[in-house]
Image (cartoon, rainbow, N blue to C red):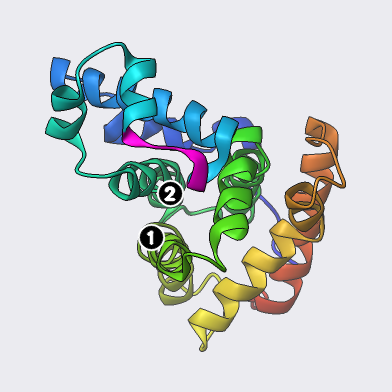
Amino acid sequence: MEMPTKTLRDAPTFKDSPSFRDPPSFKDQRRERIIQVARSVFYEVGYAGASMSMISSRLGGSKATLYAYFNSKEDLFEAIVREQCQQMADLFLAHTGSDDLRTTLTVMGRELLKAIMSNEAIRTFQLVVEESYRNPQLAEMFHNVIQSQGRSNLTGLLQTAHDRGQINAPNILEATMVLKSLIFGDCHFKRIMNLAVEPTEAQLHRQVDLAVDIFMTYYGVKPTI
């Protein structure tokens, strides 16, 4: 079994991504404010109950200002989803190509699980599930964004590890699914169903450490003697 050569403290975090270093423009700040207000409205009254008029009223500006940024509440909700998924994409990209894969997967997994188990992320999942029967296009959009911004970058991280000889994963899509399933466990489903509270840091670490141990035991390349 591969042993880490660096401590978890030495590993990069997704905050090292360039997207966190560029100061936002006024337009970006305004757009982010709209997304924050829209998010609170969606979480409060649900997707079906929200409207552009309600969001505009909460913003305190004119509808023209809101429509200058977003054409519809569908566009607004997609922006919320994309913003959350971009955090995952930045996280995976920041850890791609590390020399110490075990440490990288551990740090990445802890940050990923903390993000997806947050109240905001869980509420977004719940909104999509609630609306998916009446609005399958919303569910399809959610799935496509997760695939393009989230899972594809995790696949890239593992493909790079495979190409560098750190893991043996000829079916990289299957390896991505396995790692994701191990990290999420059943705790994510319980959170979505309101059967569990947000886990403690110790619980998150235990879940991820076990997931990485299992993944590396199966996929890790044994050192040659």
At 17% from the left edge and 33% from the top edge, which residue is drawn?
A: 67
Q: Which residues are magenta?
A: 48-52
SS at badge 2: helix
Q: Is residue 49 magenta?
A: yes
* Residue 40 image position (x, y, % from top left): 50, 27
- Distance from label 1 to label 2 (Cα)? 7 Å
Residue nearest the viewer, comparing 9 with 4:
9
- Name the quadrant of the N terminus: bottom right
Residue 20 shown left or right of residue 167 in the figure: left
Residue 76 shown left or right of residue 190 in the figure: left
Q: Which residue is mark 1?
A: 145
Sequence-wise, the earlier of marks 1 and 2 is 2
Above or below, 140 relative to 202? below
* Residue 105 image position (x, y, % from top left): 60, 53
Above or below, 129 relative to 63? below
For label 1, count other residues whose C-alpha is less than 10 Å away and answer few (under 14), some (14-19) or many (20+). many
At 50% from the left edge and 36% from the top edge, which residue is drawn?
A: 42
Which amino acid type is shown beneath numbered disc 2? Cys
Residue nearest the viewer, comparing 165 with 56:
56
Q: Which residue is mark 2?
A: 85
Specify the farthest residue to the bottom: 170
Q: Are marks 1 and 2 in contact (CB under 8 Å)?
A: yes
At 24% from the left edge and 26% from the top edge, which residue is drawn?
A: 31
